[in-house]
Amino acid sequence: MKRSDLIDVIYGRKNADIFIRNGILVNVITGEIYKTNVAILGDRIAYVGDFFDGIGKNTLIINADNKYLVPGFIDTHQHSYETHVNMTEYAKILLQHGTTVVSEAFYGMGLVAGKTAVEQCLKELKATPLNVLFFLPIMAYIQNRELGLEPVPGSITQEDLLEMLEWPECRGLEEPPYIPIIEKDKFFIDLFEKAISLGKVITGHASGCDIRGLNAYAAMGASSDHESTGAQEAIDRMRLGIRMSMREGSGASDVVNIVKSITENKISPNFYMYCGDEVEFLRIVEKGHLDYNIKLTINSGVNPVDAIRMATINAAEYFRISDDFGSICPGKIANVVIVNNLFDFNVETVISKGELITLENKLIKDSKLPEYPDFMYQTMKIKRFINKEDIKVKVDTDSGSVRINVIGVEDGSLISRKLVMEIGVTNGIVNPDINQDILKIVMLDRYNRWEKPSVGFISGTNLKTGAIGTTYDPLYENILVVGTNDEDICLAVNEIAKMGGGFIAVKNNKVMGKLELPLFGLLSDKKIESIVPTMKSLYSEIEKMGCTLKKGPFHTLGFMAVCGEIGDLKLSHKGIFDVNERKVIDLVV
């Protein structure tokens, strides 16, 4: 199709492919809400207006019946691997909730399996009706080089980043951390400069950044942040021209708190956007994606038109793609969402790239899963299985008690507190104390680099029995397990390694539930419909074991491992790590 064909549709010389009749348009350009019709030809919008005569026998007519037409939503910071579904199913669940454009770097896969993994996932996602904005997977390069750790064999290199920056799909840099910038790391300074010279967007990651750091970060070109958790953090960044991407993930629930900067502090909503960041698939299926962010924003007192702008035109202008995306206007890519009203905001019909995806809550377009190459499987390469002796915590005193540094979990937050708690000692060994909710947390390397697990203690899960484990922890994607006793912890670690990665719950030396994620140890190779019941059952088992983490237990657990600048106390490959001090500290105080 040529753009000039749209003119023939407008004047009735050619019939539209899709005609949306009698909808109420939310015009994110003017702020108006009014009745209109929309005609689509190919993958673009041809006509928006009252009268239209370009309808033929092959035109698909959608009666909007006084429902609301809004542009397809644009996610400004999303990691597909954190949903734990393959790219084909990832596109499907996002599209069903109205997200038609996503920014994506595939950094989890890139960390595990390098540039080849990034290429493979980008190819699969581009084959779906989801519009993809590729960003450079900075974290796949830098995260596994922090803390003095040898890089993951075959992971992303500096040369890979420079090559991918030139890819025609590349829109910019995905969340390069601020510390290398304020330290004037030559590679990152040069990378920022090159990205800016090429007209690329630099999305930020400013967790824990002070005002000097924010100024330096902004001065070098970082222009957004998704790590703010409250109103004042948002205001501090907005005042420096750093746009706010409000996150509502599985382990981090930030929208309601950040929105107070608009409702209470009267900050202009014009530069706010949304992201899903670390949201897993079951949350999307049950509550939504960016449509859920919009609901939270509207219910918090923000004008519905402004809330919709955050998911559409604000994001499009930020990414410099508003010529094609972000509004329902002639010539734009035909990404149109029909919702029941502006308060319940239930997505009923979705069109992406001119293709009808869902109609009145029924999935119209589904995709067949591809055949996945062998290199995406069997990526768990441990030195050996562990035993109880490997994870014993020995101290100098034979009996009594010691004061230890403990990771303090907070449900709905990626930030963990630094706690100092007193715990009993028996025969020189420190064991978990269930009554105090002081449990053991263990990390085992998955890249065949070292065999000794790292061990610490954690509080806040309220697990009363057994152990739970994951291969999702964004710094390393290592095996990470929390448990009440050494026997269950060892079983959880070893079973995760055997099944090639995923989530697990163990009790009384028995596997109570698991979800296998065989692709890179991070993604399912199955259809979404087949794994939803498995995940629900697993969550049910965890709840029976006493776990009180409701926002997303595995995602919350994953961020108890070191993840860049997200504080305060975490577990690293060398032991307990104080993020604010940037160093490993002793377990015993």
Image: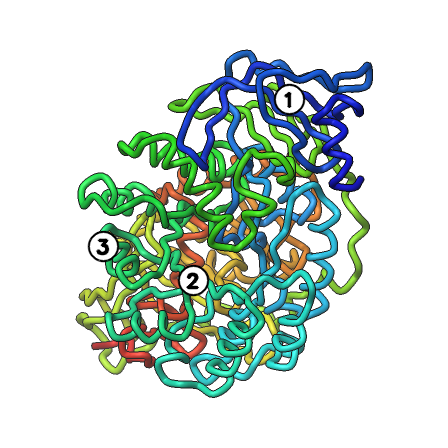
Q: Mark 3 points at which residue?
A: 436
Query: Where in the figure is residue 170, as x and y percent of width and height?
Result: 63, 63
Residue at 41% from the left image edge and 63% from the top image edge: 223
N-term-proximal mark, 1 vs 2: 1
* Mark whose residue sits in front, 3 or 2: 3
Is disc 1 placed on a helix, strand or loop? strand
Query: Where in the figure is residue 233, as x and y percent of width and height?
Result: 25, 57
For badge 1, the amino acid type reads Leu
Instruction: Please name whichever residue, 517 or 511, is drawn nearer the observer in this view of the structure.
Output: 517
On the image, which quarter does residue 415 sit in?
A: bottom left
For badge 2, the amino acid type reads Asp
Query: Where in the figure is residue 184, as x and y percent of width and height?
Result: 40, 85
For badge 3, the amino acid type reads Gln
Is disc 2 placed on a helix, strand or loop? helix
Colouring rule applied to residues: rainbow
Q: Which quadrant holds the C terminus?
A: bottom left
N-term-proximal mark, 1 vs 3: 1
Instruction: Please name whichever residue, 107 or 98, is drawn nearer the observer in this view of the structure.
Output: 98
Direction from residue 279 to residue 524 in the image, left or right: right
On the image, which quarter does residue 297 sit in?
A: top left
N-term-proximal mark, 3 vs 2: 3
On residue 486, the disc is 2
Q: Alpha-carbon distance for marks 1 and 2? A: 51 Å
Pointer 3 local density, CA inside 10 Å: few below 14, some 14–19, many at least 20: few
Residue at 57% from the left image edge and 44% from the top image edge: 325
